[in-house]
Image: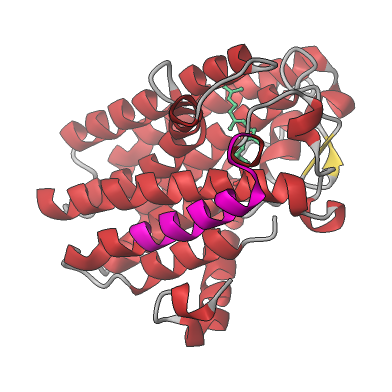
């Protein structure tokens, strides 16, 4: 990446990585403590296998970053909410890897859930993680979140994960396989499939922090841009990434006949699109009233990520 394109916080890039590691650690510890170890048959083991298998924890970090922007970094509700989003993310990956969908053998450098537990348990583990996420959202009342706000959070997450969000995007993505689509159609697929669940932790955490409407608008625009950036970079990594860093084989999009930014625009224009989307994300933050440092650093991180 060209240094001048980065936010002016580059010098503390190392600090940001440490911050991300701290957010990930908090998330892991909470997930470890809250996910049951026993229950019906292999279900708990299967759920824990995929949820506690590493991952960048970007969605949980986004919620915690917004918490810090509003000086609510110690707020227990934000951690619970962040973990609920990670459960939905874990469920989506388990189901996405199934033979009926992407049929992948490896995820996060480990055999996929269905390879270890079989298709039936993998489907049920995904179902259970999705259901548990809503149970955890309902428990926000234990963290002194007002019931009306909890209802707002449930609606926000349901919208992001459902037919007008991630699931809808997944359907459009599957239907587009081996078909010619244009760049607008590709953007719609990604904003639903990936963007919605990257936006939800940002907006949800802002609601938990009682952010004003103007800041929520800024955060919505920012999260849409980083969602798009995330996907453009994902497509680039699938062409240019390396197996060890990615934790899965590159080239899978092409093998599956998926339309991607490089397949429609070519590599050069895709790199330029990533750079301009990154710049637009930073631009969105100009009128943000709270401290934007960590948000800008997150945009940099997504732009320069290697896995
Ligand atoms: C099955 C309902 C359903 C939805 C699946 C999220 C998704 C929709 C599919 C995942 C397939 C995929 C590789 C999408 C590209 C972007 C993406 C979501 C990558 C995985 O997210 P990361 O990189 O994963 O945040 P880690 O492992 O770091 O948590």
Please name the residue shown 81% across and 32% down the image: 112
When the figure is inspected, residue 39 is found, relative to residue 72, above or below; the finding is above
Q: Visible in this render: residue 30?
A: no
Q: Position of residue 282 (x, y in %)?
A: 34, 64
Vertical position of residue 293 compared to residue 61: above or below: below
Prevalent SS, magenta region: helix
Q: Residue at x 36, y 58 (%)?
A: 281
Corner quadrant of residue 26: bottom right
- Furthest toward the left, the residue is 213
Foreground pick, 269 / 64:
269
Image quarter hosting the N terminus? bottom right
Quarter of the figure with residue 252: top right
Residue 13 location (% of width, % of height): 53, 80
Q: Position of residue 306 (x, y in %)?
A: 69, 60
Numbered range of the magenta stretch: 264-281
Scheme by which the image is coloured: secondary structure
**Horizontal side, residue 33 vs residue 42: left or right:** left
Q: Nearer the viewer, residue 262 or 31?
A: 262
Q: Is residue 18 above or below residue 73?
A: below
Where's the C terminus, which quadrant?
bottom right
The residue sitting at 77% across, 12% down in the picture is 120
Residue 43 placement, left or right of 89: right
């Amino acid at each position: 990446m060209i240094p001048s394109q980065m936010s002016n916080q580059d010098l503390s890039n190392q600090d940001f990585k440490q911050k991300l590691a701290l957010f990930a650690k908090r998330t892991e510890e909470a997930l470890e403590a809250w996910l049951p170890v026993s229950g019906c048959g292999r279900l708990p083991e299967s759920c824990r296998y995929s949820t506690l298998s590493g991952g960048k924890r970007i969605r949980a970090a986004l919620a915690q970053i917004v918490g810090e922007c509003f000086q609510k970094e110690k707020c227990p509700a934000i951690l619970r909410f962040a973990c609920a989003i990670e459960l939905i993310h874990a469920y989506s990956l388990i189901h996405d890897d199934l033979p009926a969908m992407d049929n992948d053998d490896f995820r996060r450098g480990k055999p996929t859930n269905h390879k270890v537990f079989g298709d039936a348990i993998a489907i049920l583990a995904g179902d259970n993680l999705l259901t548990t996420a809503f149970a955890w959202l309902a428990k926000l009342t234990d963290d002194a979140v007002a019931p009306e706000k909890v209802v707002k959070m449930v609606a926000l997450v349901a919208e992001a994960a459902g037919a007008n969000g991630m699931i809808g995007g997944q359907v459009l993505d599957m239907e587009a396989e081996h078909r010619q689509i244009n760049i607008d159609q590709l953007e719609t697929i990604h904003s639903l499939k990936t963007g919605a669940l990257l936006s939800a932790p940002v907006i949800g955490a802002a609601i938990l922090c009682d952010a004003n409407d103007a800041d929520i608008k800024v955060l919505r625009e920012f999260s849409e841009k980083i969602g798009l950036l995330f996907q453009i970079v994902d497509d680039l990594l699938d062409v240019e990434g390396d197996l060890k860093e990615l934790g899965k084989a590159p080239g899978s999009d092409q093998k599956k006949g998926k339309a991607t930014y490089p397949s429609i625009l070519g590599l050069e224009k895709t790199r330029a699109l990533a750079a301009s989307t990154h710049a637009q994300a930073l631009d969105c933050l100009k009128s943000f009233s709270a401290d934007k440092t960590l948000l800008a650093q997150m945009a940099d991180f997504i732009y320069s990520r290697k896995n």
